[in-house]
Amino acid sequence: MGAKDAVLRTAGSLSTYVRNNPEIVNRATDIWAENNRLSKEIKKLELQNAVQIQKITQRYELCRDVLTQIFAERSTALMAHYKTLDQALASDDRELIIVSLKGISSIVSQNPLESFAEFTKALDNEDEVLNLDF
């Protein structure tokens, strides 16, 4: 009796078992169908996940760029006012000193994050149309 005989005997026993227990085949078929359904669901979720990650990444990059631009503009404006103030102090030009200080004060008193909060609120609202004011 060789390995071939043992395999044939096992296959025969399995075949007999399946014939005598048809619910096993039904359960295996149900399990296979559920596995296929879940595999499709997993692929769908993976695709949705990739799309959401892309949206989050794009939103992060947009917000980062907007904040960078806001603070860069602020910095540039402040530097210009301070340069003018230095020149006004050097020439003892009182009117220019006052104008420079008012300019600095108006920039410093504004909270750039308030406008950013409005921007992100509008960005979050898919029904709102964004108006670009150039």
Image: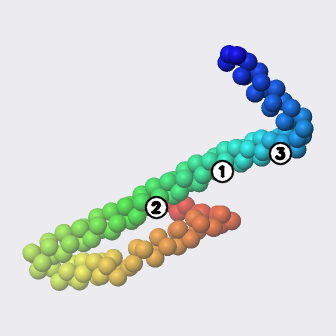
Distance from the alpha carbon under mark 3 to that under mark 2: 53 Å
User: Measured from the top left, where is residue 69 in percent x and y?
Assistant: 38, 61
Which residue is under mark 2?
63
For numbered disc 2, what is the local secondary structure? helix
The residues bearing labels 3 and 1 have C-alpha atoms spaced at a distance of: 26 Å
Q: Position of residue 120 (x, y in %)?
A: 53, 68
Residue neighbourhood size for the residue with mark 3, other residues' Cα within 10 Å, grouped as few (<14), some (14–19), many (≥20): few
Graded by Cα atoms within 10 Å as few (under 14), some (14 to 19) or many (20 or more), the crowding at tag 2 reads some
Query: Mark 2 vs mark 1: which is more N-terminal?
Result: 1
State which mark lies toward you, 3 or 2. Answer: 3
Q: Disc 2 residue type?
A: Cys
Label 3–label 1 contact, CB within 8 A: no
**At label 1, which amino acid type do we have?**
Leu
Closer to the camera in the image, 3 or 67: 3
First along the sequence among labels 3 and 2 = 3
Q: Which numbered dot is residue 45?
A: 1
Question: Contact (CB < 8 A) between labels 2 and 1?
Answer: no
Left or right side of 30 for 86: left
Q: Residue at x 20, y 80 (%)?
A: 97
Q: Is residue 42 left or right of residue 74?
A: right
102 up-or-down from 124: above or below: below
Residue occupying the far left of the picture: 90
Q: Label 3: which residue?
A: 27
Q: Residue furthest front?
A: 1
